[in-house]
Image (spheres, rainbow, N blue to C red):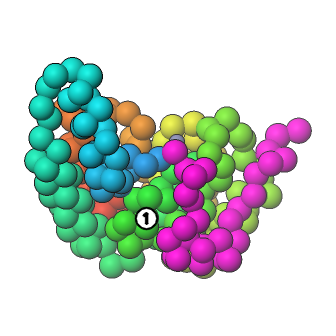
Amino acid sequence: MIGENITVRDSDEVHAEEDGDAHGAGDPHLWLSPLSFTQALPSLTAAINKATGLSIDEAAAIGRLTQLDNEINEVISSVSSCVLLSGHDEMGYFADRYGCTVIGAIIPSFSTTSEATAKQIADLKMLAESNNVKAVFTGLGTPAEVSEQLASELGIAAVSLSTHYLNGAANYREFMLNLADQIAEALR
Ligand SMILES: [Zn+2]
């Protein structure tokens, strides 16, 4: 039997997310918000500098991450309503930081191995309709036939995001800006 452990988020969870704390310890996708790194940087650079004899400039690194954060914010601000339906439950940090709302995920768990069932997809479809979702974002581990079927039933696009790999981007900055651009373009 597939998908026994799949649930679509209910509205309470969506509200909890708006409060900023729905993910926390269980969500590994910290890298989707550049500012997440700034907290870890002082101890990280100290440890690297001590171990290698290098002198990595912590302030410069924080400056670059802050600038990137501002750039992403500008891109996402161009979207009037940033409502996200994602492949798996990966957009929590991004959504919190950039004022988006995650209404659900095709695979709403932190694993990428579960499969979705018809009933749960039907629930997700209703949720997407009532939230006027403009695109289904998919990616790592999401069965393409499920996301494409859902998108086609909703009459919207299925957009594959690279949230875990650079996917041709030269560096982290480019990776994050590509992601923000893709999201903004699909939601405009
Ligand atoms: Zn993931």
Who is closer to the viewer here, 45 or 73? 45
Image mark count? 1
Quadrant of the image containing the N terminus? top right
Q: Name the spot of residue 3 as percent of width and height, x first.
A: 79, 45
Residue at the outermost right position: 1
Q: Name the spot of residue 112 as percent of width and height, x first.
A: 62, 38
Left or right position of 185 against 22: left
Asked whether residue 12 is drawn in magenta, I would say yes
Q: Residue at x 80, y 58 (%)?
A: 119
Q: Residues within 10 Å of mark 1 (few under 14, many from 20)?
A: many
| Main SS of residues in magenta | loop
Who is closer to the viewer here, 91 or 187? 91
Q: Amino acid at mark 1?
A: Ala
Q: Residue at x 21, y 20 (%)?
A: 52
Residue picked out by circle 1: 95
Up/down of 139 relative to 127, above or below = above
Left or right position of 146 against 56: right
The magenta segment:
1-28
